[in-house]
């Protein structure tokens, strides 16, 4: 998002919790938003399944 590192931005990123993310609008304004799942049935789509390759890569990074 081409933000210059600042103490204020570091505090904001450090205070974010699960389901929050940064978004940049068409006017290049950056803000923090919260994403909520509307239906319980959709929760499975957000789960991350790791392959064996992913586990091996984590060991080396």
Image (tube, helix red, strand yellow):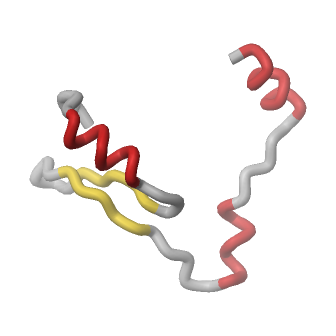
Q: Is residue 47 above or below residue 35?
A: above
Task: Choose between 40 and 19: the one closer to the eye.
Answer: 19
Q: Is residue 19 above or below residue 29?
A: below
**Which corner quadrant of the image does residue 40 belong to?**
bottom right
- Quarter holding the C terminus? top right
**Which corner quadrant of the image does residue 53 belong to?**
top right
Q: Is residue 14 left or right of residue 54?
A: left
Q: Is residue 32 left or right of residue 49?
A: left
Point out the residue furthest to the top here. Answer: 60
| Residue under the point 39% across and 45% down | 14
Task: Choose between 61 and 17: the one closer to the eye.
Answer: 17
Across and down, in percent, residue 13 comes to 36, 45
Q: Is residue 56 left or right of residue 11?
A: right
Across and down, in percent, residue 25 comes to 20, 56
Across and down, in percent, residue 24 comes to 24, 51
- Quarter holding the N terminus? top left
């Amino acid at each position: 998002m081409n933000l210059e590192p600042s103490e204020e931005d570091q505090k904001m990123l450090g205070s974010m919790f699960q389901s929050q993310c940064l978004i940049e609008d068409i006017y290049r304004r950056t803000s923090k938003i919260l994403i909520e799942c509307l239906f319980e049935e959709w929760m499975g789509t957000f789960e991350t399944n790791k392959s064996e390759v992913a586990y091996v890569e984590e060991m080396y990074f």
